[in-house]
Structures are given as C-alpha cells and as structure tokens.
C-alpha cells in the first residue's frame, strides 16, 4: 500500500463517511489536550472519496474530529495513492486502533460484523477474535452479531453498563419487545441477576397471557411504583420484581406468603429453622435445631411441643379434621 504525506484542508475531509470507523466512543478531551501540546504525532490515513475533491477517512476519525473542534484549518495526512480493496483498508483501520484502548463490547461486535464482509466465519473466528480479546469460538461470533443488530439505544446502554452484556444478548432475541425492557432498566437500577430475572418473568408472562412486553410493563401497578417519590430506586426495583413474580407464579408466591405468615405466628426461637420443600413441590417440611447444650435441646423440644399444637400449623399442613 503506497501513500503520500501531504497537507490537507479539514474542509475537504468528509467526516460523515463512517465506513471504516471501528472505534465509536466519545469523549476526546485528553486527545485535544495532546494535540494542543504536541501536535498530531500520528497522521491519519485518507483516500480520495467518490465525491469530487473530497477525502474519506480510513483511520484517524477521533484525531480529525478533535482537530476540527480545536479550530484547526488543515492537518498532515497520509493519502493513499493506490486503491487497494476495502478489505485491506478495513484491516488498516483495525490494526491502527488495536494499539490504543481496548474496544468496548459494542465496538467489538461491530468490528466482527464488518470482518464478515471480507472473511469467512472460520477465518474471523481463528484469526481475529483473539485480537479483540474474545474467545475464538462460534458462540462469540454469534453473540457479536446479535449485539451489533441491537437498537442503538440498547447498544449505548451496554457501553454505559446500564444493561449487562449477557442480558443484552437475551434482549437481542426479543425483537421490538427489547426496548421497553431496556427502558425499565434505565429507570430502576437492577443487578445483572435481577435484570435476567425480569427478562425471564416478562417473557413467560408474555407467552402465557399473549401480551406484549410493553403491555406488561405499563400495568397500573408498575406505573404506580415508578411514580412514587418516597421510594429509592432499589425499593422500586424490589416492588416491580415482586409484582412480576406474583404475576408469573401466583400460586407459588401465595404459598410463600402463607408460609412466612405461619412462621411468624409460631414464634420460633432463633435456634430453630423451619423450611418448606423447594418451590413447595412436595409435602415434606424440615426442622433444624442448633444447640450447644442438653438444656438448649430440652428447651427447644418443649417449645416445639407447644408449636405442634398450633391450629394454624395443622391447617397449613392439611391436618384439620
């Protein structure tokens, strides 16, 4: 690839042509400070555009943008004389950026998608995923394509850690239902596991009740929680999670509530644990007694004898005659 170093007026550079841009993050204050102090140490690469007397950027998007914002009139650039194929130009842009900051998940996903324009899936997996600090397996490539196809709003959420990457992959399989869920995550801070729980519950409710995700999330109960100014974001999140869990598992949550009320009514001492079968699937309940002395055992036994006579316990366990 041959190029000539020359002065180019910034007005002749087409900054709107993003065909070879591989790093899309914003925030160039440090770069502008560097340009002000030391000038442009590494010259961008340009080539003549299809538009008359215009140049397209091959690499150096951020440097050129920073120079433009600083009011520079021209820069020194490497203008590519011959015209290699797009594949070579894209690889030049990629390798130029590999030595800088690591790519974020969205940038990696978009790079993988672009690489597939020039190489087979096998070549991308074997030769390029490791360059992007990605595991060189098909699943990594598949997930990248799902992320690359996401709505720009959700992609920005990945960059800003509003939505976890693995949850974004789940959203990518949901079509138009993804955006309402993501916008809920913007309003209420959920951990990665809680985001996954919300997604699963909404998907199941949607299938069972033939409702869109938007219809589920605009329920009056959720709107009421979001409008409450007396609740923290965490408290709002817990109430929304409970509402969706009740809607998905009404019988299970009812049993859990009943069992919790029962335990409170029994007044069990701290050293006695009373547990239900997992998900109330079965009829075997368990009692665990923690003790250090025989006297503690006798005291616990006396307490449990009184507990065994509770009408509420008998009713819950189905022993009422």
Image: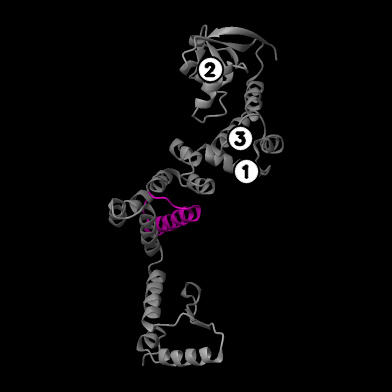
Rendered location of residue 33, percent (x, y): 52, 22
Rendered location of residue 9, percent (x, y): 52, 8
Residue at 37% from the left image edge and 86% from the top image edge: 315
- Magenta span: chief secondary structure: helix
Q: Is residue 235 left or right of residue 114?
A: left
Magenta-drawn segment: 188-212
Q: Which mark is residue 102?
A: 3
> N-terminal of the two: label 2 or label 1?
2
> N-terminal of the two: label 1 or label 3?
3
Whether residue 7 is situated above or below residue 276 in the rendered picture = above
Q: CA distance from mark 2 to mark 1?
A: 40 Å
Q: Which mark is residue 140?
A: 1
Disc number lying in front (3 or 2): 2
Q: Nearer the viewer, residue 34 or 149?
A: 34
Residue at 56% from the left image edge and 85% from the top image edge: 292
Q: Is residue 189 magenta?
A: yes
Q: CA distance from mark 3 to mark 2?
A: 24 Å
**Picture colour scheme:** one colour
Q: Which element carries disc 2, helix, strand or loop?
A: helix
Where is mark 2, residue-wise?
36
Disc number lying in front (1 or 3): 3
């Amino acid at each position: 690839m041959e190029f000539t170093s020359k002065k180019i007026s910034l007005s002749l550079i087409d900054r709107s042509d993003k065909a070879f841009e591989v790093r899309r993050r914003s925030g160039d204050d440090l770069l502008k400070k560097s340009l002000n102090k030391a000038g442009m140490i590494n010259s961008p690469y340009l080539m003549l555009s299809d538009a008359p007397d215009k140049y397209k950027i091959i690499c150096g998007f951020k440097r050129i943008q920073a120079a433009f914002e600083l009011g520079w009139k021209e820069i020194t650039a490497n203008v590519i004389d011959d015209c290699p194929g797009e594949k070579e130009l894209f690889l030049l842009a990629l390798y130029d950026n590999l030595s800088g900051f690591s790519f974020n998940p969205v940038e990696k996903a978009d790079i993988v998608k672009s690489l597939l324009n020039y190489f087979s899936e096998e070549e991308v997996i074997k030769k390029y995923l490791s360059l992007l600090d990605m595991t060189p397996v098909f699943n990594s490539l598949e997930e990248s394509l799902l992320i690359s196809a996401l709505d720009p709003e959700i992609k920005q959420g990945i960059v800003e850690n509003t939505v976890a990457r693995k949850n974004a992959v789940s959203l990518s399989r949901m079509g138009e239902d993804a955006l309402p869920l993501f916008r809920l995550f913007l309003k209420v801070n959920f951990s990665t596991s809680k985001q996954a729980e919300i997604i699963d519950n909404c998907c199941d409710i949607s299938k069972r009740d033939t409702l869109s995700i938007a219809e589920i999330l605009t329920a009056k109960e959720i709107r009421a929680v979001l409008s409450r100014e007396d609740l923290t974001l965490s408290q709002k999140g817990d109430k929304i999670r409970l509402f969706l869990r009740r809607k998905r598992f009404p019988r299970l949550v009812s049993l859990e509530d009943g069992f919790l009320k029962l335990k409170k009514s029994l007044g069990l001492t701290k050293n006695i644990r009373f547990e239900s079968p997992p998900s109330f699937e079965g009829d075997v309940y368990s009692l665990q007694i923690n003790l250090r002395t025989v006297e503690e055992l006798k005291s616990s036994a006396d307490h449990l004898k009184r507990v065994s006579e509770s009408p509420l316990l008998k009713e819950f366990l189905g022993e009422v005659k």
